[in-house]
Amino acid sequence: MLGIGANKQRLPQPQDALPGRNDAMPLHDAHYVHGRPLRAGPDAFAGLAQVQFGMGCFWGAERKFWSLPGVVTTAVGYSGGYTPNPSYREVCSGQTGHTEAVLVVYDPAQVSFDTLLQTFWENHDPTQGMRQGNDVGTQYRSAIYCSDEDQYRAALASRDAFQARLREAGYGEISTEIAFPAPTFYYAEDEHQQYLAKNPMGYCGLGGTGVSCPIGVGA
């Protein structure tokens, strides 16, 4: 098994990942900002769509999405790795394979997937690999985990369009992981949900490249 001091910029092999646990973390199932449920079950959110975004520390990333008109609810958690129901400390050890992710549940009649993608691309640097600014580790990698093939195709097309703009601005290659179907989303502990609404002066390491994403403007 990998030690706590292992290279946190390298994903663990499945057999080396922490075992996790059978039970999910306790969760107060109400959004701190608007009170709607966090768990996006089929009964609670019939007719809505969802997607998972990883773009560095999930505290600041979640705030970018909960304020968008048409987004019904958001939650932070862990996704893309191997360890079931991990803790925050376990994810930060680099031994789970998960990235910090934001679950976005939205009404496609009120907000387009393109708008969500534009928010994603313009609010972090997707060329940094296993880091985001001063936050270093596999848990900070960029990711889009899609719920259907239309989302997947749109995400790939948006990546290619944004890549062209980034090259023009002198940036390297996008390292964002784009996957369908989306992996299991494990909800983070209550203290991390809507963290920056509870702690307005809390840490937010989110920062974009300053390059505009051409989605929705004829690109």
Image (tube, rainbow, N blue to C red):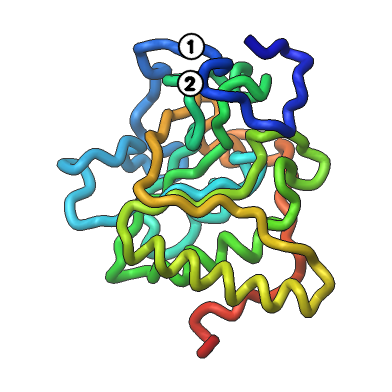
Task: Please say if 98 is above or below 34.
Answer: above
Residue at which label 1 appears: 19
Q: Secondary structure at mark 2?
A: loop
Task: Please say if 55 is above or below 81.
Answer: below
Residue at (45, 51) in percent of width and height: 179
Q: Amino acid at mark 2?
A: Thr
C-alpha distance separating marks 1 and 2: 6 Å
The answer to the question of whether label 1 and label 2 lie on touching residues, with beta carbons closer than 8 A, is yes
Nearest the eye: 179 or 106: 179
The C terminus is located in which quarter? bottom right
**Residue 140 locus on image (x, y percent):** 66, 39
Residue 66 image label: none
The quadrant holding residue 99 is top right
Residue 83 image label: 2
Residue at (63, 34) in percent of width and height: 139
Farthest residue to the bottom: give it: 218
- First reached walking from the N terminus: tag 1 or tag 2: 1
Q: Is residue 200 left or right of 189 when viewed as pictured? A: right
Residue at (38, 51) in percent of width and height: 180
**Residue 198 locus on image (x, y percent):** 58, 34
Residue at (51, 90) in percent of width and height: 218
* Marker count (numbered): 2
Task: Please say if 102 is above or below 175.
Answer: above
**Residue 167 locus on image (x, y percent):** 76, 74
Q: Residues within 10 Å of mark 1 (few under 14, many from 20)?
A: some
The N terminus is located in which quarter? top right
The quadrant holding residue 21 is top left
Nearest the eye: 127 or 16: 16
Q: Is residue 42 left or right of 185 when viewed as pictured? A: left
Q: Secondary structure at mark 1?
A: loop
